[in-house]
Image (spheres, coloured by chain):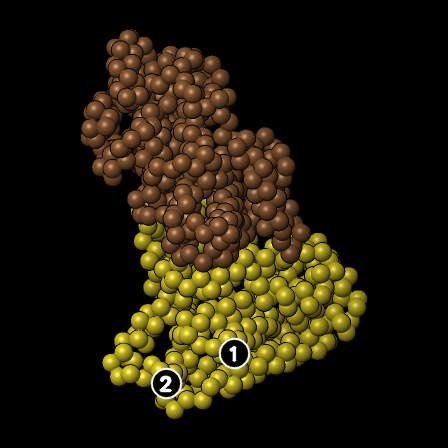
Chain colours: A yellow, B brown
């Protein structure tokens, strides 16, 4: 889908879809599982032959959502790397590092436009609306991060809102889109949305923890990249509630690198890591509960997918990298 | 018949030995004759070929001209000078206000970034919205079924709001591409003020461009017409492809007129052509009419860009070298140079060295002056302008005065595109 007329644009756009560099493909996995989890055959559609063809057309369209979502995601990565002057991404040189900022901006735009064309081809304007909103949220989230005031940066509410925009909105709205394509009711669509949203939030919160703890349970073994870039995440925000003096340290983070160590000390003394994990678990449970509230089914495939989705809510918490 | 009289006048004028550029500056009003009777069979526009320099109308109506430069003495059709922009001025300011409202964002910095080019005084000539609003009126031929008194008005105004939506979306896409282009070009100024990236940094410009694009997508979705969504999404893709073609072309490609016209279509004409088509589709017009709207936009866009290329050399005077020369200084080879290269193959080497040695610019200009490059570009522009006007002429007949006036304005635009000198 990302083959382009202009060769350089093609290699730029393909960059993150090449074998080995596609990432964990977390989002497409969720969406494909959700698609199966929601394929509850409604009585009207049980007419023998048509029931077989209908699901596969539907399946193609639902797969389309997964493709579109991945294109939007990669487009945002390309632009983010330009914005962050990043050198590496997914273990290889970032595109902007390898080919320059210009072609990265263009490739991001190109992927976005291909996503829009693919969206239009689904002929469902509510779905188009949902995913267009996602792009808007991605931008808003990134801007919130870039331009926040000190007060905003110290606010847990602001942080959760930004995290929703940057991470959870894509998953939640694409899950909802899957449900809408399947002709499900508004209630079921909302459950799919809640699953995606809570899973996304849980994912990001654990991500924040891992940035500090890395592959061991102790503090400071992680990459510390957030805090080194002056990005204040949930653990620090919680610690700041216990130790107000941490605020001043955090304000000076970029001016003096030794402040990172001071901040880590405070974090170790606080319950910041633990409270973040607890919040992540709350969201993971909400996600699992959303699946549990889906309409009952006897279909084995459907049941298996739902179990898999619930299993994901555990993996999101227990992962250590 | 008015038409045949016009034809005779044309032949005699044609035989006089005048160059095209001199003709343009003459005081005659140029317009395509809109035949009053028995014209618009779908065959009329089969003769249009958008390549090379040979154009011929296969329809008997036009009598198979080689150069379809049709003259027409100022007729009684218009009483005063028709200004297309003033026809839609009120609606345009409505549009600007709506645009400003649409780019309001939750995050203040993003809002000021996005609004940057919609502020009063900086909105640009609003060329594209003008065309689209005029096209909307030009196509609002009331179909018999819709003539039930009250509902026709309501339908029309709902339709109008949607068509205005196309104009808003188009402007957002256009500004988004400007924002990204300025980042890509490290530009300092745009529309006479500091470019956004210069004022606020590349990052926020990239983001603001993305933001506008996403707002455009949301607005598109709200129109609930997936063909329109598809059309305008394709435009974004074309904008990107055109920009990339410019950035990454090989030497052979850069010396090719075909490649240049394709790139120009992507970068400039696609937005106008596809949004004109979208306006037609929203109005429920047939595929043929939609295609005529598309052809108008496409040819107008191409004519616009070709004259733009000329003006970069000639600026506000007719002589060479008074223009800003920004294209050639950036190593961007446009139509006049491409034509000159056909006459003087040695110009190719000069052009290859443009960026290495600035004095090559002067050498290139010399060759250009000796060649017919400027003239041939103008001629090509006029061919496209005429094609655009002809597309309007082929629209289904109407008695509605507003519709007729808008069509005349659209045709007038095809002249202004050629005669402008800045």
Expressed as whole percent of the image width and height from the top left, the position of residue B180 reads 50, 43
Residue at left offset 20%, top offset 28%: B60
In the rendered image, the quadrant that contains the N terminus of chain B is: top left
Residue at left offset 34%, top offset 32%: B393
Q: How many residues crowd around disc 2 within 10 Å: few (fewer than 14), some, or many (20 or more)?
A: few
Expressed as whole percent of the image width and height from the top left, the position of residue B89 reads 56, 34
Looking at the image, residue A43 lies above or below residue A144: below
Looking at the image, do the residues carrying marks 1 and 2 touch, with CB atoms under 8 Å apart?
no
Expressed as whole percent of the image width and height from the top left, the position of residue A314 reads 51, 83
Q: Which residue is mark 1?
A: A187
- Identify the mark nearer the N-term, 1 or 2: 2
Q: State which chain disc 2 sits on.
A: A
Of tags 1 and 2, which is closer to the observer?
2
Q: Quadrant of residue B77?
A: top left
Residue at left offset 32%, top offset 76%: A55
Looking at the image, residue A234 lies above or below residue B226: below
Residue at left offset 22%, top offset 22%: B66
Q: How many residues crowd around disc 1 within 10 Å: few (fewer than 14), some, or many (20 or more)?
A: few
Q: Which residue is mark 2?
A: A43
Q: State which chain disc 1 sits on.
A: A
Looking at the image, residue A306 lies above or below residue B130: below
């Amino acid at each position: 889908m990302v083959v382009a007329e202009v060769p350089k644009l093609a290699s730029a756009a393909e960059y993150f879809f090449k074998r080995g560099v596609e990432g964990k493909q977390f989002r497409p996995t969720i969406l494909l599982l959700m698609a199966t989890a929601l394929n509850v055959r409604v009585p009207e559609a049980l007419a023998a032959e048509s029931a077989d063809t209908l699901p596969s057309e539907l399946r193609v369209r639902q797969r389309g959502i997964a493709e579109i979502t991945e294109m939007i995601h990669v487009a945002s990565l390309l632009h983010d790397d330009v914005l962050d002057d990043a050198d590496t991404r997914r273990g290889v040189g970032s595109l902007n590092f390898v080919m320059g900022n210009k072609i990265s901006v263009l490739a991001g735009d190109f992927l976005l436009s291909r996503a829009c064309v693919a969206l239009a081809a689904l002929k469902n304007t509510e779905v188009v609306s949902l995913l267009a909103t996602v792009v808007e949220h991605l931008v808003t989230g990134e801007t919130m991060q870039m331009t926040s005031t000190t007060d905003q940066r110290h606010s847990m509410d602001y942080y959760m809102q930004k995290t929703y925009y940057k991470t959870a909105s894509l998953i939640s709205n694409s899950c909802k889109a899957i449900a809408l394509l399947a002709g499900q009711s508004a209630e079921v669509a909302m459950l799919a949305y809640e699953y995606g949203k809570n899973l996304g939030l849980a994912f990001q919160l654990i991500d924040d923890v891992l940035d500090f703890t890395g592959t061991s349970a102790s503090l400071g073994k992680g990459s510390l990249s957030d805090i080194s870039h002056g990005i204040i995440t949930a653990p620090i925000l919680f610690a700041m509630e216990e130790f107000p003096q941490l605020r001043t340290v955090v304000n000076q983070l970029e001016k003096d690198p030794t402040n990172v160590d001071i901040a880590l000390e405070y974090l170790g003394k606080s319950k910041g890591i633990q409270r973040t994990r607890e919040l992540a678990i709350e969201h993971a449970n909400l996600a699992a509960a959303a699946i549990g509230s889906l309409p009952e089914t006897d279909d084995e495939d459907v049941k298996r997918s739902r179990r898999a989705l619930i299993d994901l809510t555990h993996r999101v918490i227990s992962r250590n990298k | 018949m008015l038409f045949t009289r016009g034809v005779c006048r044309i032949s005699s004028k044609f035989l006089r030995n005048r160059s095209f550029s001199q003709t343009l500056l003459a005081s005659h009003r140029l317009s395509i004759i809109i035949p009053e009777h028995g014209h618009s069979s779908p065959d009329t526009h089969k003769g249009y070929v958008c390549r090379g320099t040979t154009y011929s109308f296969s329809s008997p109506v036009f009598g198979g001209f080689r150069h379809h430069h049709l003259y027409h003495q100022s007729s009684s059709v218009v009483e005063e000078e028709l200004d297309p922009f003033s026809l839609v001025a009120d609606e345009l300011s409505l549009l600007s206000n709506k645009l400003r409202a649409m780019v309001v964002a939750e995050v203040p910095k993003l809002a000021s970034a996005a609004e940057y080019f919609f502020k009063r005084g900086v909105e640009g000539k609003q060329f594209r919205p003008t065309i689209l609003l005029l096209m909307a009126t030009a196509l609002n031929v009331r179909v018999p079924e819709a003539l039930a008194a009250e509902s026709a008005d309501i339908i029309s105004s709902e339709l109008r709001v949607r068509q205005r939506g196309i104009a808003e979306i188009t402007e957002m896409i256009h500004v988004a591409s400007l924002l990204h282009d300025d980042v890509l070009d490290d530009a300092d100024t745009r529309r006479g003020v500091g470019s956004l990236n210069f004022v606020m940094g590349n990052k926020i410009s990239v983001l603001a461009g993305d933001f506008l694009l996403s707002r455009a997508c949301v607005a598109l979705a709200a129109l609930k017409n997936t063909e329109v969504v598809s059309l305008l999404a394709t435009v974004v893709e074309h904008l990107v492809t055109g920009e990339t073609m410019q950035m990454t072309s090989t030497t052979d490609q850069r010396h090719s007129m075909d490649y240049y016209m394709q790139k120009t279509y992507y970068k400039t004409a696609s937005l106008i052509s596809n949004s004109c088509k979208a306006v037609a589709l929203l109005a429920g017009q047939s595929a043929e009419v939609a295609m005529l709207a598309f052809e108008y936009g496409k040819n107008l866009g191409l004519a616009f860009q070709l004259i733009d290329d000329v003006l970069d050399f000639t600026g506000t005077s007719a002589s060479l070298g008074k223009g800003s020369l920004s294209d050639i200084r950036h190593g961007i080879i446009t139509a006049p140079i491409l034509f000159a290269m056909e006459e003087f193959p040695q110009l190719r080497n000069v052009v290859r060295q443009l960026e290495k040695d600035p004095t090559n610019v002067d050498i290139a200009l010399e060759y250009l002056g000796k060649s017919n490059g400027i003239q041939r570009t103008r001629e090509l522009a006029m061919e496209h302008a005429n094609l655009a006007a002809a597309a309007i002429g082929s629209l289904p007949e109407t008695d509605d005065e507003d519709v007729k006036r808008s069509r005349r304005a659209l045709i007038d635009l095809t002249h202004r595109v050629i005669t402008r000198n800045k």
